[in-house]
Image (cartoon, rainbow, N blue to C red):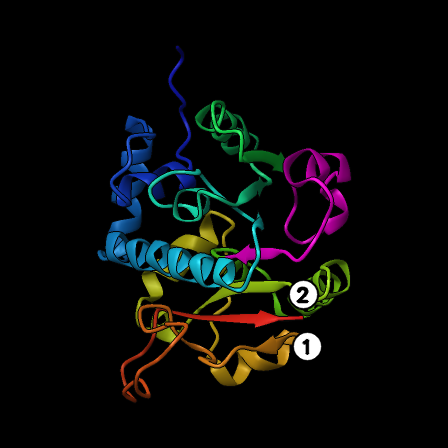
């Protein structure tokens, strides 16, 4: 087997999550990223925990079909592992992620992997959707780890098209990078240098992007605080937030 020579962010995230699907070149990438921000392991563990909570919440609403955008690798508590009775279609634009994802899911009858550019819903072949999910009913759409790389004007259009495409009663889970990144200009400069510009947002700037989607009761919260049923109002803090999350519905 020929080892890859270019780091892959999905494999790097798998490393941070405690997985095993990474190579020496990915560890080199990890070191470069951690020079700009040393807490990526905690960030991605919080984000994966959030993905688990929103997936279980959506399933609790009677939904058993999920489409995941910008999936990365289907490992370490990803959607099909936390809602194993549901059908899941993972999608990504990266051919390496798709190939490895299909290998990982080869023996799982409830989870498939297909190509999709998250900014262009037309790139998702309907035949792939039909094969993975059957007839489209209410959907759980997982759009986590994606919005931070899409500018406002394009993201507004993408979410609007998703609204038109999704059956009534569908739910959409999102996350957005918060403004803590401003405290790490070295990280932002590094990401820009590798073509991964981050769009940093807060609840005030996030809400208009949601368009016709309706916020569920928890609203827009730091991903570490998002819960479907909050026993109390989350404490207000002046600390900058790394990632916000919300679940919306049609």
* x 62%, y 35%: residue: 114
Query: Would residue 122 be found to the left or right of residue 16 on screen?
Result: right
Look at the numbered discs 1 and 2 and tell me whether their residues touch, using CB distance below 8 Å.
Answer: yes
Residue that numbered label 1 is attached to: 211
Per the image, is 101 magenta? no
Give the alpha-carbon distance from disc 1 to disc 2, as whole Å: 7 Å
What segment carries the magenta color?
116-143
- Residue at 36 percent of width and 54 percent of height: 48
Q: Which residue is mark 2?
A: 159
Q: What is the quadrant of residue 37 in the picture?
A: bottom left
- In the rendered image, the residue lying farthest to the left is 38
Percent across and percent down for residue 104 are 44, 27
The location of residue 211, given as percent across then percent down, is 68, 77
221 or 167, nearer to the observer: 167
Indicate whether residue 117 is drawn in magenta: yes
Q: Quadrant of the C terminus?
A: bottom right
| As drawn, 102 above or below 193 | above
In this picture, is 115 found above or below 183? Answer: above
CA neighbours of label 1 inside 10 A, class few (<14), some (14 to 19), many (20+): few
Residue 218 quadrant: bottom left
């Amino acid at each position: 087997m020929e080892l890859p020579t270019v780091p892959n962010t999905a494999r790097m995230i798998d490393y941070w999550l405690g997985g095993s699907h990474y190579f020496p070149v990915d560890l080199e990438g990890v070191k470069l990223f951690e020079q700009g921000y040393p807490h990526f392991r905690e960030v991605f563990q919080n984000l994966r925990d959030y993905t688990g909570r929103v997936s279980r919440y959506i399933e609790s609403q009677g939904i058993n079909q999920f489409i995941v955008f910008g999936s990365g690798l289907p490992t370490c508590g990803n959607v099909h592992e936390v809602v194993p009775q549901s059908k899941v279609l993972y999608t990504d634009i990266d051919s390496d992620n798709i190939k490895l994802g299909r290998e990982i899911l080869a023996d799982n009858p409830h989870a498939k992997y297909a190509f999709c550019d998250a900014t262009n819903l037309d790139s998702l072949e309907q035949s792939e959707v039909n094969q993975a999910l059957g007839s489209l009913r209410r959907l759980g759409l997982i759009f986590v780890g994606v919005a931070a790389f899409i500018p406002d004007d394009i993201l507004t259009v993408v979410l609007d098209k998703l609204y038109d495409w999704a059956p009534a009663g569908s739910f959409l889970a999102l996350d957005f990078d918060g403004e803590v990144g401003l405290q790490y200009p070295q990280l932002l400069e590094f990401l820009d240098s590798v073509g991964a510009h981050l769009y940093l947002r807060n609840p005030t700037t996030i809400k208009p992007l949601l368009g016709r989607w309706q916020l569920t009761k928890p609203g827009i919260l730091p991903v570490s605080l998002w819960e479907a049923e909050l026993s109390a109002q989350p404490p207000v803090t002046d600390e900058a937030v790394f990632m916000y999350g919300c679940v919306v519905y049609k």
